[in-house]
Image (cartoon, helix red, strand yellow):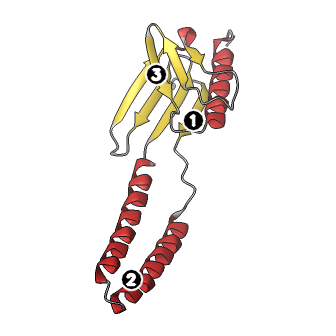
Amino acid sequence: MTEPAPAEPVYFDAVLRPHRSLGPAGFAAFMIAVAGVSFIAGLRFWVLGAWPVAAFLALDVLLIYGAFKLCYWSARRYEAITLTDRDLIVRQVNPRGDAVVWRFQPYWLRVDQADTPDCDAPLHLRSHGQSLEIGAFLPPSERHEIGRALSQALARQRLPHFD
């Protein structure tokens, strides 16, 4: 029997996801409040004979619900970044679940970003004429933190290994 090959060391492994501050319970409470206020106001307008206003208030509730659902649907996208001895792999997955995989040779890879975390500059990976923007949906401070951590991981990966 042959022994299995040792696992390749992983220097960086992160999954980047867009942040949504309102969870499911908060969303339900918010929608109940919006629907309740709209129902009471709509009922008042209906009694006064201004029934079209009630219809528009109901439409408002549906549009608010749809906007939040679209926001939650877009939050299903993510980027998975893994750095090993042989590759830096970036897997970008859109909200539908379709994935695009990018592979870079880590030795030649450059992480380009602004020097200050409060600057809203993009974070790019560059190698051999290829450029990929990562973390575009993150706030500038998180994007800067990811770029710094990835740069440090690349520096560790490039150190000579003595087995």
* Residue located at (43% from left, 13% from top): 130
Q: Amino acid at mark 2?
A: Gly
* Residue located at (44% from left, 55% from top): 72
* Residue 25 horizontal/vertical position (percent): 53, 69
Q: Is residue 60 left or right of residue 152?
A: left
* Residue located at (54% from left, 14% from top): 106
Q: Alpha-carbon distance for marks 3 and 1?
A: 16 Å
Label 3 SS? strand
The part of the image, by quadrant, that contains residue 103 is: top left
Which label is found at residue 42? Answer: 2
For the C terminus, the image quarter is top right
Which label is found at residue 80? Answer: none
The answer to whether 150 is drawn above or below residue 66 in the figure is above
- Of tags 3 and 1, the one toward the viewer is 3
Q: Amino acid at mark 3?
A: Leu
First of labels 2, 1 by sequence position: 1
* Residue 111 horizontal/vertical position (percent): 58, 18
The part of the image, by quadrant, that contains residue 54 is: bottom left
Q: Alpha-carbon distance for marks 2 and 3?
A: 50 Å
> Which residue has dot 3 on it?
132
Q: Is residue 119 left or right of residue 30?
A: right
> Which residue has dot 1 on it?
14
- Of tags 2 and 1, the one toward the viewer is 2
